[in-house]
Amino acid sequence: MFERSKRGEQALLIQPHAAGHNDADVLDEFAELARSAGATVVGNLTARVDRPSPALYIGSGKADEARLMCDALEADLVLVNQTLSPVQERNLERHLERRVVDRTGLILDIFAQRARSFEGKLQVELAQLKHMATRLVRGWTHLERQRGGAIGLRGPGETQLETDRRLLAERVKILSRRLDKVEVQRTQARRARMRSELPRVALVGYTNAGKSTLFNALTGAEAYAADQLFATLDPTVRRLDGLACGEVVLSDTVGFVRDLPHDLVAAFRSTLSEAREADLLLHVIDASDPNVRDRIVQVNEVLGEIGAGDIPQIQVFNKLDRLEASVEARREWLDGGLIERVWLSAREHIGLALLRAAIGERFAETRIRTELHLPPAAGRLRARFYESKLVLTEVADESGWALQLDMSRAQAERLAADDPWFASQMQAHLKLPLEAWEQGAEEDEAALGRVGS
């Protein structure tokens, strides 16, 4: 097995492409992935592949050329911007006499470096083990040895490969059980936020679009942010206040990338659920990216894969400070008002007020402001209003309390479901069936006695 260099690996990049699809931007992104993993890119090689070779993926001629380049450039690592089968990866290593890592393995390596939380580390290890399961035979000559034959070790025998596979499968089961427990805890926390009836907003976008920088600028948090791919893996949740709609819950999520490994999508199911269960997505886009349209399409494809494709979006074009042409922060609507865009710079704190206004307006329509007169017998309901922070003003007199309330529609519906008297007072706002509340004054009096119970 090839040893990992301690001086920082010198990497040769191989970019396979079909006829007519030699995209330099794809290779640039792959080079950035390599640098994010800690490798030094010393050269790159493009290889036209109309029909992948079952043995090497690339042709044998290109494999020979790659070996000569590795020798000339002193590269000790070869990175292939494609998902290789275990056989292809093993054969390439033998042919090149160097370690070979495909796109999936490279992204997994970056995730392993970036994971900070207990859950994130479990998710990455699980994805790595699933990827490793089919690659146990790579270059390991000791796997042919049998246990058994010596004193105390006789028996049916088991190859070292079978032992490793069994131990790996057991480790996968352990990690899966631990992740299930962590997911239960995260689900409970998410349900607690849902019970608060606060609207949920999630930041999504291509990796390195500036999501964490925007998250910090909006909330004053100190989430890790850096100009590198996959700087943030673990979701961070904060309350965002001062909006026209009141408070909302804002979450920062992992960035997306084209051809995100399926094992990672599966392993990060609980992290991605922050986006899947949001009421609104802030799709953060790097306005300075020359391939901005492709990035939007790629993010929307991943959102569709995780079941978040139908959630309303606000497109946030970030990094205005990097544009050569002078572009002012602004809001705009496309397709007859169906698509809203906000242009800003999170790093320079330019245009944040526009985004806050856009979020507030999205949820303002779901809020109800009304006056309600509570009789003295409704003290428990009044207490619930204060507990939920729904009261704007209050005037007390001999007949009870005159309250000015501000609540979300979801809060009003929940209170109405618990209390018939409150539901009868809110019928006009909630458009509830009149038949349920036209029961006469006597039934209203009886309901009043059950207020807050």
Image (tube, rainbow, N blue to C red):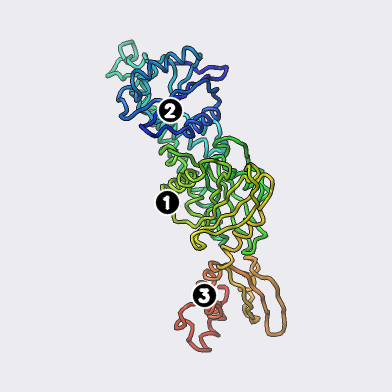
For disc 3, the marked residue is 430
For disc 2, the marked residue is 15
Q: Position of residue 113 (x, y in %)?
A: 55, 31
Residue 162 or residue 262, whichever sits in front: 262
Amino acid type indicated by mark 2: Gln
Amino acid type indicated by mark 3: Leu
Q: Residue visible at 62% across and 76% down?
A: 370
> Relative to 95, does residue 247 appear above or below in the rendering?
below
- Asked if the residues shown at circle 3 and circle 1 are in contact, with their CB atoms under 8 angstroms apart, the answer is no
Q: Residue visible at 39% across and 18% down?
A: 93
Number of callouts? 3
Location of the C terminus (image quadrant): bottom right
The mark found on residue 307 in the picture is 1
> Relative to 339, does residue 10 appear above or below in the rendering?
above
Relative placement, left or right, of 51 versus 384 is: left
Q: Position of residue 99 (x, y in %)?
A: 44, 19
